Image: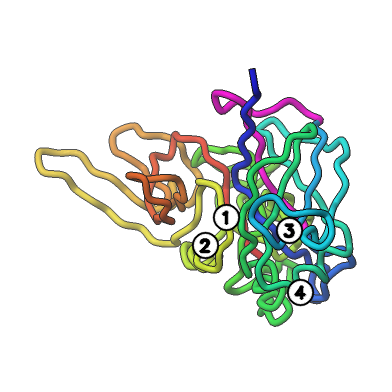
Amino acid sequence: MRTTWVVLIGALIAQVAAGDGIPRTGALQYAGVLLGPGGTPLASPQNIGISLWDVDQGGTATPNQKCITPARSRELDAQGRFTVTLDVGCQGAVANNADLWLEVSVGGTALPRTRLSAAPYAIEASRANRVVLSVPDGGRTTVDGLFCGATSNTNGNVQSGSLTGYRAAKRLCEQACNASTTAHMCTAFEAIRFYELGGNLPYGWIKSGAGVYTGYPGGGAAYSDDCHGWSTASQVGFTRLGLTFDPRMSSGITSGIIGTSNCDVTLPILCCD
């Protein structure tokens, strides 16, 4: 029986050196999630390769294959997530070819190709001119960043070491985005902008910074307040809600939607930089 492989959260992103906006050598990475039949994350490691083509299917290595990152054993986390740093030649291939298709191979099986959007170079251009804010104690963040990664699943009570709430979320995002000291939890605007540029995000928590109270006829109430500043997963007495970005299929249509979820639900935090 043929095994079905599924790649989710597939996104080609451009890395930059922390703080200076200068692209690293071989700056393109592909981040994704591998699930097997039934949606179960694949075991680690997996033999994964990446290639870029100028046709959506078929073709030959010459002239259609524009760059290749050879398959080799790569680690996956417990959710099936992985990253592959593309061969240095891929950066030039993306810059010089307006219409490319990306193919992921897993264990020697080539998955269907996906169109490569303009997002990688949009990201690079934005970050090269990004605004960085800092405070005297050393804390730093970017203004109007773009998606750079996602944390492990967490409920609305976000913790990292001794930190809780918004500060814990930022620390987790710094770890999820290659130790970038300016990474942070995405706002709704940042998530939408990345999505409209053609980037792919997982379903996860984002921040609103707002507190909205909703009373229901006949009793009951809900507070949409970033899970009380990302400090609680409790639903006792009323409903606490956190803001989410949801790119999943809905009624047969792929659409990025800003929504809410109960704070006792576990989701990754979406991180921007």
Where residue 210 sits in the image (x, y, percent)?
A: 39, 61
Q: 132 above or below 268?
A: below
Element type where label 2 sits in the image: helix
* Residue 16 location, quadrant: bottom right
> Callout 3: helix, strand or loop?
strand
- The earlier-in-sequence mark between 4 and 1 is 4
Q: Earlier in the sequence, mark 3 or mark 1?
A: 3
Residue 81: assigned label? none
- Label 3 to label 1, Cα distance in Å? 19 Å
Choose the circle earlier in sequence order: 2 or 4: 4
Give the tally of numbered discs: 4
Q: Which residue is outermost to the top?
A: 1
Q: Tell me which label, 2 or 3, sits earlier in the chain.
A: 3
Mark number displayed over residue 195:
2
Range of magenta residues: 29-45
Return the x and y of residue 173 as percentages of the image width and height: 67, 53
Amino acid type for the residue under numbered disc 2: Tyr
Q: Which residue is mark 3?
A: 53
108 or 90, which is in the foreground?
A: 108
User: Would residue 73 appear left or right of 239 to someone viewing this image?
Assistant: right
Q: Mark 4 highlights which residue?
A: 95
Query: Is residue 228 visible in this depiction of the protein?
Result: no
The amino acid marked with disc number 1 is Asn
Residue indicated by mark 1: 200
Q: Nearer the viewer, mark 4 or mark 1?
A: 4
